[in-house]
Image: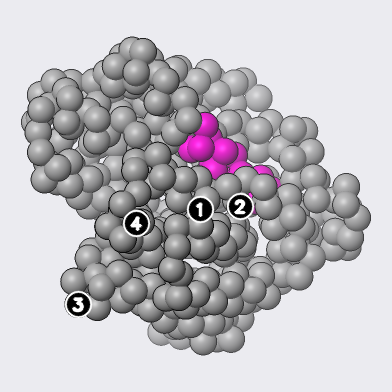
Amino acid sequence: MARRTQGSPFAPRVAVFLGAEALSAIGSWATIVAIWGYAAYEYDATPADVSLFGIAFALPGVLLGPITGTVIDRLGAKPTLVVAKVIGVLASLALLAADDFRTLALLSALHGTAGSLSIPALQTLPPRLVEESQLARTNALVSLTDELAIVLGPAAAGIGIALFGFRGAFVFDAVTYAVGLLVLPLVRLRSVPLAAGEDEEPPVRLRDAFEGWRLIRRTAVLRRTVACTFSVHLLYGTALLAEPLYVRDVLGRSEQVFAALQTSFGVCLVLGGIAAARLGERLASFGWVALGVGASGLFSIVYLGTPWLLVAFVGVALWGVATAVISGPSRTVLQRATPARAHGRVLSADFVAASSAELLGVVVAGGLVTALGVQRTIVGLGGGVAVAAVLLARADRRD
């Protein structure tokens, strides 16, 4: 049994580590939900005020991306995760003493800083955790930790708030970060073979911080994969603002229906993630990434472009499955096309692209929805994302 699992995501040490990361992701989502609720109920925050917390969470990922990638490639993914988790513990405990709106916003940014370090660091680990033959499956399982958090994080926040108030969720998050810290020493990393002529010297100069972007610009498959990331996250950011307005104004339904639609998306996202992990290597190509992005564009139209509730449920469920096809396979493509010494900088650049696109989507969506309405906005943007995916896939086949 030990031989069969050695070098696989099911090896005991790797499985425990992935379980701890799933728990940490759930705690982080619980804190996001709790902070938004805390601001709304304790400080009577307006929708614009609450949106500032979303920006505070996302902005560090955009601003710190080049630095984060350099830190990962210089120090290693494990030490970077240690730093991120220590920051997370301190930020979560500090929320217990937050007594004004400004402090809450600053601590949200500190949580965003922890995420901007931990997410790219975690994404660089699979090539160093498992054998090459298990890489695609492991990336899908790492993505599944986030997908589970989307479903279980709000539930954990609800339970913590119901039992202990908003601060219960903050304590839960600190505990999950601490569990991750305790588990990290169990992780044993494998050496990643260097490509012929590859320099193994770690980045030391300021210009090295942008090596990830230079590699993306020079390498077609990296450029196309990051373009897919940007496109689909622009759609996610727009939908973040459009969904509640769609349920209220187009469907004419209550917040319970909105919650049910979100639950459907989350459940199908997790089911899609499980399927992606089972299929593993069969999805590990740019063609599948482009297919997932194109399907996301089309299914967003089925979801938010219809006035019929049943069709909306079908669309949101299929969108969840399509989203699961993108995450793990795209990281496998990025890792395989990138020199091992630059994994941190390229994956951090991909994270910057995702965070920037979501922020842009939130900002642009307000004006577009006001001018065009929810349905026309999503039809235009979803259709554009689908067309972009087709063009990128055709370009990839020509190479």
Q: Secondary structure at mark 4?
A: loop
**Disc 1 marks which amino acid?**
Phe
Q: Which mark is residue 179?
A: none
What span is colored magenta in the figure? 346-360
Q: Marks 4 and 2, Cα distance to the nearest angstrom? A: 24 Å
Name which of mark 1 and mark 4 comes first in the sequence. 4
- Measured as percent of width and height from the top left, residue 360 is found at 52, 32
Location of mark 1 (residue)? 57
Residue name at image x 22 percent, y 45 percent: 262
Name which of mark 4 and mark 2 comes first in the sequence. 4
Q: Give the quarter of the image for residue 112.
A: bottom right
Q: Residues within 10 Å of mark 4 (few under 14, many from 20)?
A: few
- Quadrant for the N terminus, please: bottom left
Q: Secondary structure at mark 2?
A: helix
Residue name at image x 69 percent, y 57 percent: 68
Q: Marks 3 and 2, Cα distance to the nearest angstrom? A: 32 Å
**Disc 4 marks which amino acid?**
Tyr
Q: Are marks 2 and 1 in contact (CB under 8 Å)?
A: yes
Q: Which mark is residue 163?
A: 3
Q: Give the quarter of the image for residue 256.
A: top left
**Label 4 vs label 2, nearer the camera:** 4
Residue closest to the eye, 124 or 274: 124
Q: Which mark is residue 60?
A: 2
Residue name at image x 74 percent, y 55 percent: 67
Location of mark 4 (residue)? 43
Residue name at image x 58 percent, y 47 percent: 59
**Disc 3 marks which amino acid?**
Leu
- Measured as percent of width and height from the top left, residue 85 is found at 55, 74
Q: Is residue 302 left or right of residue 16?
A: left
**Disc 2 marks which amino acid?**
Pro
